[in-house]
Image (cartoon, rainbow, N blue to C red):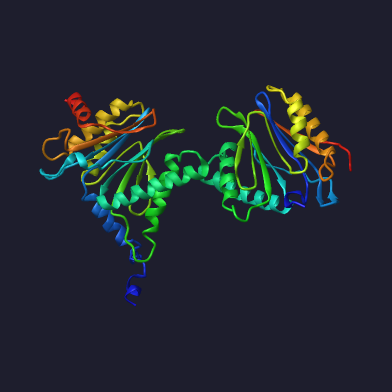
């Protein structure tokens, strides 16, 4: 009998036509640390702040996750929620491969994840995911970058930012972006953008960088590699 | 009497030089009685993929309708046509799902696969065990022995489209003449990068 109390959907429309739970989920995302991504001609770069308390073992924590060999993602918002989506995304990708013996395209995987996130805005007894995702992949139709929000909306971007500093970061990216960027330029642009809104000193231990290049493999850069790139922009 | 021999029928597919062909007989019968001599067993999935289904006629129709459903949804979702190789895998999964109560069909898939339009043929048994061959594949319980013999003899690699038509035509006609429940003419489809050419063959109407 107590179960009946939670069998309705928590996302019900307000008189102004909003779904307030989704608004609140977005607020949670905007309180999370900044993540951004830039698409180049020959790949995509994902970058995120990784500010951890001094005693936390930063080597064990990774905000960037691999969904398939050639599709990676980063989040802003609640880490545990993002882990659930990573697992579901990986399973969907493998199920696709089992049926078609073809690797899932970035667009198809994004649609699946967005569909899952939307389900959680229209089902009983659940709440929306408290994350926005930036999904980067390289497949037969080239490099791709997508953003997925708690509502389940998704967009393809040339460059985008989510989280705390997204407004300034996006303005910065708009000025700096051009369609002829190579991956190396994109990495520099990403680091510079992250630096703009960074509180305190940015170094190889408090940011995380990952790339998907035309070899179609997601690679999280090692702290040493990140240090080199940071050095290059100074 | 085996269920796969209830309606009879024969399908064969062959690879040529930058082309593929598929042929089937035209008989639709119920055991000894012939109902129609104008029933081909080959269906078009899209311009670069054809599928032939031998076996129980009712299951052929159902399996084709299921495939058409899957490929139409695929086309809408992926915004492109399904590759013949992918379709082969999908069909294999579909048939294995019914492992302990199978569809009595023996599919043959042919097409030009991928952006390079490479000739592709495959066949499978009624529970989805795939067979990927480089030369020819065939299906049809009662006509298969004769078909294997004549295909093995007449096939050469790198046949041009016209030669492929001749070889396929001769194979299907001579093989079904050895089988009481297949025949009543034949149809041959030859697929090249330019398109599909279909020709109906007049055979012994017995």
Residue A124 visible in image: yes
- The mark tally for this picture is 0
Place residue B11 in its image quadrant: top right
Q: Is residue A198 left or right of residue A22?
A: left
Q: Position of residue B190 (x, y in %)?
A: 72, 31
Vertical relation: A68 (above or below) B16:
below
Place residue A208 in its image quadrant: top left
Give the residue drawn at x 42%, y 52%. A115
Place residue A116 in its image quadrant: bottom left
Vertical relation: B162 (above or below) A53:
above
Vertical relation: B2 (above or below) B15:
below
The C terminus of chain A sits in image quarter: top left
Q: Is residue A211 left or right of residue B97?
A: left
Q: Is residue A47 left or right of residue A4?
A: left
Residue A192 versus residue B19: which sits nearer the camera?
B19
Q: Position of residue A59 (x, y in %)?
A: 19, 39
The N terminus of chain A sits in image quarter: bottom left
Give the residue drawn at x 13%, y 40%. A199
Q: Position of residue A185 (x, y in %)?
A: 28, 26
Residue A40 visible in image: no
Give the residue drawn at x 85%, y 51%. B32
Q: Residue furthest front?
A: B1
Q: Position of residue B141 (x, y in %)?
A: 74, 44
Residue A71 versus residue A118: which sits nearer the camera?
A71
């Amino acid at each position: 009998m107590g179960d009946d109390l939670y069998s309705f959907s928590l996302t019900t429309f307000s008189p102004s036509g909003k779904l307030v739970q989704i608004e609140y989920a977005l607020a949670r995302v905007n309180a999370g640390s900044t993540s951004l991504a830039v698409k180049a001609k020959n790949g995509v770069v994902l970058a995120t702040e990784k500010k951890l308390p001094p005693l936390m073992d930063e080597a064990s924590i990774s905000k960037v996750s691999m969904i398939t060999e050639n599709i990676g993602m980063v989040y802003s918002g609640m880490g545990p929620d993002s882990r659930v989506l990573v697992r579901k995304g990986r399973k969907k990708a493998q199920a696709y491969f089992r049926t078609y013996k073809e690797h899932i395209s970035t667009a198809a995987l994004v649609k699946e994840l967005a569909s899952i996130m939307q389900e959680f805005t229209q089902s009983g007894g659940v709440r929306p995911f408290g994350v926005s995702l930036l999904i980067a992949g390289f497949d037969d139709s080239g490099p791709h970058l997508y953003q997925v929000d708690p509502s389940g909306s998704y967009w393809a971007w040339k460059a985008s930012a989510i989280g705390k500093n997204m407004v300034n970061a996006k303005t910065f990216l708009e000025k700096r972006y051009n369609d002829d960027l190579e991956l190396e330029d994109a990495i520099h642009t990403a680091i510079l953008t992250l630096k703009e809104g960074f509180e305190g000193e940015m170094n190889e231990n408090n940011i995380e960088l990952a790339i998907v290049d035309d070899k179609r493999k997601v690679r999280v850069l090692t702290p040493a590699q990140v240090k080199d790139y940071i050095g290059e922009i100074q | 009497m085996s269920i796969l021999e209830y309606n009879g029928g024969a399908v064969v597919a062959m690879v040529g030089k930058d082309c593929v062909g598929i042929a089937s007989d035209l008989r639709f019968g119920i055991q000894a009685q012939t109902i129609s001599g104008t029933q081909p067993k080959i269906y078009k999935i899209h311009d670069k993929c054809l599928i032939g289904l031998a076996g129980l006629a009712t299951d052929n129709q159902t399996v084709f309708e299921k495939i058409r459903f899957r490929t139409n949804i695929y086309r809408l979702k992926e915004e492109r046509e399904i590759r013949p190789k992918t379709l082969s895998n999908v069909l294999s999964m579909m048939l294995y799902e019914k492992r302990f109560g199978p569809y009595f069909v023996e599919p043959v898939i042919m097409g030009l696969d991928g952006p390079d339009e490479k000739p592709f043929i495959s066949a499978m048994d009624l529970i989805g065990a795939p067979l990927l061959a480089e030369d020819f594949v065939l299906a049809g319980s009662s006509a298969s022995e004769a078909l294997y013999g004549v295909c093995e003899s007449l096939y050469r690699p790198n046949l041009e489209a016209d030669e492929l038509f001749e070889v396929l035509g001769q194979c299907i006609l001579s093989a079904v003449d050895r089988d009481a429940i297949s025949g009543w003419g034949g149809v041959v489809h030859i697929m090249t990068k330019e398109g599909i050419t279909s020709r109906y063959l007049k055979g012994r109407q017995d």
